[in-house]
Amino acid sequence: MSIRKKRKNKSESKIESKRIEVTEGEDIQGVGPTQNLAELPAGYATCGDEKLVARGTNSFIIMGPDRNASCFGPSYGNQGAEGASAIDIFCGLGTWGLESKTQYYRNFKADAARIYISQKTDIDRYFDLNVNRRDGIPNSKGRSAVGIKADAVRIIGREGIKLVTKTERANSHGPPDGNIKTIPGIELIAGNDARMLEPIVKAEKLARCLGKTFDLIQSLITATKNHNKAMKKFAAKVATHSHVVAQIPAGAMSAAPSGTLIAVWGKTLTAVKFHDNSMRNVHEHFEAHMRKTYLDNMGEHWIGSRYNKTN
């Protein structure tokens, strides 16, 4: 174990010394694959007070004033603003078909991967995020920010991940100017298009709403069943109704029930019976299936997530 550790430290020291003395086109011998600097950008164009803290083959850590592009673009650092320090960690400088012998400025679109930390910045503008909506989270302007960008970004938490807003009553500007007057939300935006954003449905409230809807449907079913019972009785009375009629010579007799009404009664009973069965099936479906399957949080297809929550 100790021998292995010694060899590793020796290799690392060789790599570090080579980095200091390397010139364009010279190979860097490392523990892993060799990379030729001629295939990489010739250099990174620093501005003003920027300090190149570390550089790998094509990876950089830079400390200095806030900026996202050239030394003359619209940024707080280029404007000489106070309280606008930044740390830029990125790799893959100028990967969009740029020539290898050119001095490059940082490019939030073309660089391969980046973590950008700034004390004062317009983070949405820098990363060209299309999120300016009247009823959503406004674009961040002149605020501290952290931006992370790459082809694929993964945030992994072995014991959970929390996205939390408004942990203090003021932002980085401090009170009273930096007081946060509302509760900022969380927006998930696919395709950098915020036009179709909608509020997230909360499962427990939706379940209560649907439960009340089912209760109303049950009330209608009960009312319909009672109506059907009354219709049966009424139809029976009408169909079997008879009345006394005058008879010549003198006397009286009861008229026989109408054959037409008896026929209608039979059809009415059939229709009412079919309707009763339909109502019974609807009732059983709602109670046995819909409520227990979708509205009960122990149901097989509970409408809420068992793991993810929001307020």
Image (cartoon, helix red, strand yellow):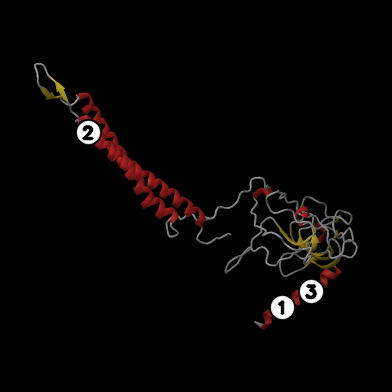
- Mark 3: which amino acid? Lys
Q: Answer left or right for 15 relative to 151.
A: right
- SS under mark 1: helix
**Label drawn at residue 237:** 2
Spatial CA span between label 1 and label 2: 106 Å
Determine crowd level at label 3: few under 14, some 14-19, many 20+ residues with C-alpha closer than 10 A.
some
Height in image: 200 above or below 264? below
The answer to whether residue 267 shows anywhere in this view is: yes
Q: Between residues 91 and 4, which one lies in front from this camera angle?
A: 91
- Mark 2: which amino acid? Lys
Q: Between residues 259 and 90, which one lies in front from this camera angle?
A: 259
Contact between marks 3 and 2 (CB within 8 A): the answer is: no
- Mark 1: which amino acid? Arg
Q: Answer left or right for 4 relative to 46.
A: left
Give the labeled residue for mark 3: 14
User: Looking at the picture, how far across and down is residue 139, in whole percent?
Assistant: 74, 53
- Which sits earlier in the primary sequence, circle 3 or circle 2? 3
